[in-house]
Amino acid sequence: MNPRKKVDLKLIIVGAIGVGKTSLLHQYVHKTFYEEYQTTLGASILSKIIILGDTTLKLQTLGRFSINGSGGGPGGDGGDVMVAMVVMAMMIIREPRLFLSLIQVPQEVAQGWCREKDIPYFEVSAKNDINVVQAFEMLASRALSRYQSILENHLTESIKLSPDQSTSRCC
């Protein structure tokens, strides 16, 4: 019996202040939604373990206003940043007047842009738990595929099994 593979992935959720990144993270990780959140200054970090295929993933989700200085590589130092994306469009459930300062993109425009770039598009609601799990699992799946591809290419390029014919034996 093969032991299950284990991989740690860091997922970064980027968006404007006040759009609901922390709400999404709490809904995904804890299955909870609070009506009142204080604006998260800095970053909100939560962890969750999921299983995709034969791989156990430890997801560290990070909600941020920007991605400057966010390491996404295996060492978390900013090197080897792996790009796997999904677009999560927040459903407007509150009164529209609360969103006057936020940019609202028509659904058709967002879907068209995502289709052009081959990026999955999800309309999500942390409050009503709509498409939250699906969006995060698609993101994790794409990140895992990218990670495995990079790992496979790195191993293929760095291991040479054929002997070097130019070396000679001595004494």
Image (cartoon, helix red, strand yellow):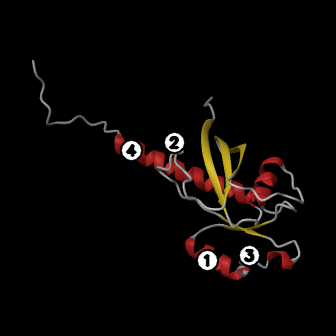
Number of numbered markers: 4
The residue that label 1 is drawn on is 113
- Name which residue lies at 66% across and 62% down: 65
- Name which residue lies at 61% across and 74% down: 115
The residue that label 3 is drawn on is 102
Chain-order first, disc 3 or disc 1 = 3
Q: From the viewer's side, name the closer residue of 103 and 90.
A: 103
- CA distance for labels 3 and 2: 35 Å
| C-beta proximity under 8 Å, tags 2 and 1 | no
User: Which numbered disc, 2 or 1, marks the residue closer to the eye?
Assistant: 2
Chain-order first, disc 4 or disc 3 = 3
| C-beta proximity under 8 Å, tags 3 and 1 | no
Chain-order first, disc 2 or disc 1 = 2
Q: Secondary structure at mark 2?
A: loop
* Kind of residue indicated by mark 2: Gly
* Kind of residue indicated by mark 4: Thr
Q: Which quarter of the rendering shows the C terminus?
A: top left
Q: Is residue 3 above or below residue 74?
A: above
Q: Is residue 25 above or below residue 17?
A: above
* Kind of residue indicated by mark 3: Leu
The residue that label 2 is drawn on is 75
Chain-order first, disc 4 or disc 1 = 1
Relative to 151, is 17 on the left or the right?
A: right
The residue that label 4 is drawn on is 156
